Amino acid sequence: MNVPVGDISALYQAEVRRLRAIVRRIVGSQGAAEDVVQQAFTNLLRMGAQRAQVNAGYVTRAAHNLALNHLRDARRRAEVELTGLELEHLPDSRPTPEMIVMCRRELQRLLEAIAALPDRRREAFVLKRIEGLSYDEIAERMGTSRNTVISQVVAAMAQLDAALEPA
């Protein structure tokens, strides 16, 4: 869609939603996408007489480039903020020995609870939650229906929740 410079508002109305979606996929947030698209159209208006015609492809490329610039600038700001911090003031994110012991105990409880599940229920649970198979793939592998697999996984989750509740 080619439009005269004076009709940039028509181009905006026609393309703004599509451009926001494209830019949002690049920058990862709706607010930043709106800012980038707004900047693209502001830049077009500033160009004024420099361009006799502007089209959707041109503004898409401009918004795409501005989105990439936004990401690059955000990365640079994050690097500057991190390098400006003094390392001794950062909290230690490593787990304490107590946390390690506690996590190991919880893991052991989980493994014991999984081992206590009935065989078919355990198989359905492991295939779904640990191996990441779809319900259809599990049903085929186990030789049962999809609904049976779903029921087994739900029952396994309920049984594990009950087994892992704090005493």
Image (cartoon, rainbow, N blue to C red):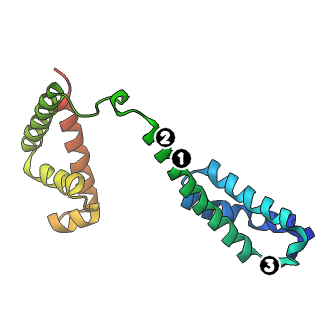
Please tell me which of labels 3 and 1 falls first in the chain.
3
The residue tagged 1 is: 77
Q: Nearer the viewer, mark 2 or mark 3?
A: 2
Marks 2,3: beta carbons within 8 A: no
Q: Is residue 57 left or right of residue 109?
A: right
What residue appears at the point 13 percent right and 37 percent down from the top-left corner? 107
Q: Nearer the viewer, mark 3 or mark 1?
A: 1
- CA gap between label 2 and label 3 equals 43 Å
- CA gap between label 3 and label 1 equals 37 Å
Q: Nearer the viewer, residue 19 or 124?
A: 19
Q: Position of residue 84 (x, y in %)?
A: 46, 38
Marks 3,1: beta carbons within 8 A: no
Q: Nearer the viewer, residue 126 or 85?
A: 85
Identified by mark 3, the residue type is Met
Q: Position of residue 143 (x, y in %)?
A: 16, 66
What residue appears at the point 26 percent right and 45 percent down from the top-left corner? 154
Q: Which mark is residue 1?
A: 3
Q: Secondary structure at mark 1?
A: helix
What residue appears at the point 28 percent right and 57 percent down from the top-left corner? 147
Q: Nearer the viewer, residue 107 or 146?
A: 107
The crowd level at tag 1 (other Cα within 10 Å; few <14, some 14-19, many 20+) is: few
The crowd level at tag 2 (other Cα within 10 Å; few <14, some 14-19, many 20+) is: few
Q: Which mark is residue 81?
A: 2
Q: Is residue 124 left or right of residue 44?
A: left
Q: Is residue 153 left or right of residue 9?
A: left
Identify the residue at the far top of this view: 167
Quadrant placement of the C terminus: top left
Q: Position of residue 1 (x, y in %)?
A: 80, 78
Q: Secondary structure at mark 3?
A: loop
Identified by mark 2, the residue type is Glu
